[in-house]
Image (cartoon, coloured by chain):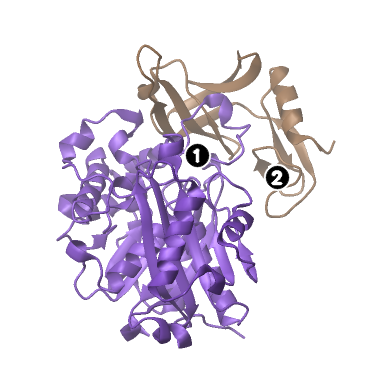
Amino acid sequence: MESVCPEVDYQKFLAEGRLMIQRSRSSGRHVFYPRVAEPVTGARDLEWVEACGRGTVYSTTVVRQKAPTPSYNVALIDLDEGVRMISCVEGVEPDAVRIGMPVQAKIVYRDDAPLVVFEPV
Amino acid sequence: MEFNLRGRTALVAGTTYGIGEAPGMSSLDLAARASVDALAQVGLSPGDVDGLFVCTPDDMLSGLTFAEYLGIHPTFTDNNRSGGSAFEIYAHTAAMALVTGQIDVALIAYGSNQRSASGKLVQSSRPSPWETPYKPMNPVSSYALAAARHMHQYGTTRRDLAEVAVAARKWAQLNPEAFVHTPLSIDDVLGARLVSDPLSVRDCCLVTDGAAAVVMVRAERARDLTDKPVYLLGAASATSHREIANMPDLTVTAAKESGRRAYAMAGVSASEIDVAMLYDAFTINTILFLEDLGFCPKGEGGRFVSDGGIAPGGRLAVNTNGGGLSCVHPGMYGLFLIEESLRQLTGRAGERQVPGARLAVAHGNGGVLSSQATVILGTEETL
């Protein structure tokens, strides 16, 4: 089914506990962030597929806060499907996250909304 | 048929105003003051301007607002929103409008009172549905991610980044207009409070007030107005992304592309450049642009800046005004790169003068390494 509300549909899937990303039927290329058409080609044959959830840390930083507020991680994750997303790695100290670290996606709830975070494998 | 802009237009006047703190003045007041001062340098007034190129950070319609403030009705108005790189792109657009005869006098202007008005960076871009839930500190976290990747791939260190900050401060100490003059050592930077790893407060640009303006005309008329015109030899721009997650390779910016085209138009190479003004919103920027603009191979930027490499007396004069890191950074800094290049190439840079400077590159950056725009400027001998 052709998605015409890419962001809304993405969030609906997250709320169902599923990390779904798009893939063009004709090129087989995966697309993130969700859009109405494939970048460059403009192909309107994007379908939703479930991401396997595995990825690798491409880059990482720690957003420093004034004590006692905890500092936290922000990272760029390359999913196995070949797309990159901004997220965070949890389950380790924020400054212990390393580029190249294999991670697995998990959907959690923050501020009453579903959110994809990653944990070291 | 290819048309070459090389040497067809010239900067004939330029100035800064209100660098640092200018309480009680609005962004428009600052921009207007810099503009009338610059125009007056060559006996012109706002009424002579028919091409207006401006963008202020807090006003989406600033082209209209500024024309109204100056009391003019330009033939051509531009209000480019590519962040700090807008001004280098303006030089390119202005050159095209001048050379085609659609305008005769271009004014490129900027002003911001962000320090006095709010004390922090003013942003007019929309919040991102993809980034916001993770609360990155933007823009610094995006640049931090780029720095971290460069360190991972090329062994660049926090010390290399610190060298950039220390060099900028040394140049600032030679510039009476620069906002910060206090001595800065490598250890000061390494010991400074981290903001978003690996970037510390000393790796980040200042938050100041400030304004700048430059005036451009066709080359044939330049010598009627000044005996030291500075010619636009090359100009080009490129964009690669908007948000950092979509930057194809965090260690290579679109400066590689904008630089290549600007150098090609100018018919010069990096090795001939005497002064490099590289938009240093963060220390990692200078390293990336030194590489992508061909001053050193990819990955060697850390080595290039080591041991005072870009400080006064080093191997290349970079950011001779003290940069966004130590001179001025009022939200969007791109026009100051052009103004300082003009200062150097007209021999008016005082204690920080690069002797015999003939060729300068002014390279602007916008967003989070998102937009890159390169301008090559040269004295009359380089035509």
Chain letter matching colour brown: A
Q: Disc 1 is attached to a residue of which chain?
A: B
**Residue B25 x/y as whole percent:** 45, 45
Q: Nearer the viewer, residue B94 or A66?
A: B94
- Horizontal relation, residue B299 to residue B188: left or right: right
What shade does chain B have? purple
Instruction: Pick out the residue farthest to the top.
Output: A68
Q: Are marks 1 and 2 on the same chain?
A: no
Mark 1 touching mark 2, by CB under 8 A? Answer: no
**Residue B242 x/y as whole percent:** 56, 46
Instruction: Give the residue number, with chain letter if any, for mark 1.
Output: B122
Residue B192 is drawn in which quadrant?
top left
Residue at the image point whose x is 51% and y is 80% from the top: B5
- Could you tell me which quadrant the N terminus of chain B lies in? bottom right
- Horizontal relation, residue B319 to residue B219: left or right: left
Tag 1 secondary structure:
loop
Residue B104 seen in render: yes
Residue at the image point whose x is 36% and y is 23% from the top: A95
Instruction: Pick out the residue farthest to the right.
Output: A1
Whether B12 is drawn above or below B363: the answer is below
Tag 2 secondary structure:
loop
Residue B84 seen in render: no
Q: Number of callouts in the render? A: 2
Whether A102 is drawn above or below B228: the answer is above
Residue at the image point whose x is 49% and y is 48% from the top: B27
